[in-house]
Image: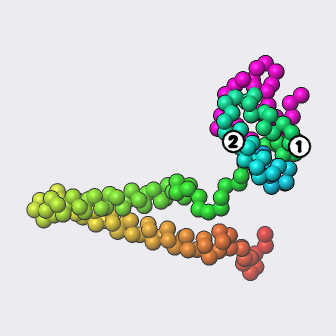
């Protein structure tokens, strides 16, 4: 019966002749680190076993490196928790934020195009200038509302206000 942590030991059927991957070697080195910290191996023995691990080509060659260590040190470690911090940028970009960015891009392009075409030289360039200015105003309005709601959410901690009963009403 194969127990937890026996992922790299040779199995019946010749799986031990499989090539050892970098993750297999890293797993063995993690086991050796835990054994060294626990005082089960000396510094020289640790260095020798790490060298043997890095030189191993197959899983069969990796198995003897940790064979004499207790099973408690051979269990696979759980995946580390993600580091605290800001979530990726695409998590925060909702449809509202995308609309604000799209409006700003359109306003900027329209203003640059109308100015480079000579805004007062042709009626089409003047209309483009007006469209760009209008888009810029919409952008500023949307941005102001987004900033207000973000400030409100930050102040309230995202909690909705409690409902107050009106005098003379019953629920």
- Tell which circle, 1 or 2, labels the residue nearer the N-terminal end: 2
The residue carrying mark 2 is 51
Image spot of residue 143 (x, y percent): 44, 68
- In the rendered view, does 104 fall on the left or right side of 129? right
Above or below: residue 139 compared with residue 89: below
Identity of the residue furthest to the bottom in this view: 167
Q: Secondary structure at mark 2?
A: helix
Residue drawn at 72 percent across, 76 percent down? 164
Quarter of image, res 17: top right
The residue carrying mark 1 is 70
Image spot of residue 92 (x, y percent): 54, 58
Q: Give, as a single range, the part of the protein colored magenta.
A: 1-28
Image spot of residue 147 (x, y percent): 50, 71
Mark 1 crowd level (few <14, some 14–19, many ≥20, 10 Å Cα): few
Quarter of image, res 2: top right
- In the rendered view, does 133 fall on the left or right side of 9? left
- Where's the N terminus, which quadrant? top right
Cα separation, mark 1 vs mark 2, equals 21 Å
Along the line of sight, the residue nearer the viewer: 26 or 130: 26
Identity of the residue furthest to the left in this view: 121
Mark 2 crowd level (few <14, some 14–19, many ≥20, 10 Å Cα): few
Q: Secondary structure at mark 1?
A: loop
Along the line of sight, the residue nearer the viewer: 81 or 130: 81
């Amino acid at each position: 019966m194969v127990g937890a942590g026996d992922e790299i030991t040779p199995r019946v059927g010749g799986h031990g002749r499989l090539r050892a991957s970098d993750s297999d070697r890293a797993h063995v080195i993690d086991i050796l680190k835990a054994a060294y910290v626990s005082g089960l191996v000396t510094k020289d023995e640790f260095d020798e076993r790490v060298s043997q691990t890095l030189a191993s080509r197959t899983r069969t060659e990796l198995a003897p490196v940790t064979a004499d260590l207790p099973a408690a040190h051979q269990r696979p470690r759980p995946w580390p928790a993600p580091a605290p911090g800001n979530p990726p940028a695409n998590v925060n970009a909702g449809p509202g934020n995308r609309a604000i960015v799209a409006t700003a891009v359109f306003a900027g392009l329209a203003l640059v195009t109308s100015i480079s075409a000579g805004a007062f030289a042709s009626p089409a360039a003047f209309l483009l200038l007006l469209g760009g200015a209008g888009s810029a105003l919409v952008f500023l309005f949307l941005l102001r509302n987004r900033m207000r709601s973000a400030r409100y959410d930050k102040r309230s901690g995202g909690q909705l206000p409690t409902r107050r009963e009106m005098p003379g009403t019953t629920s």
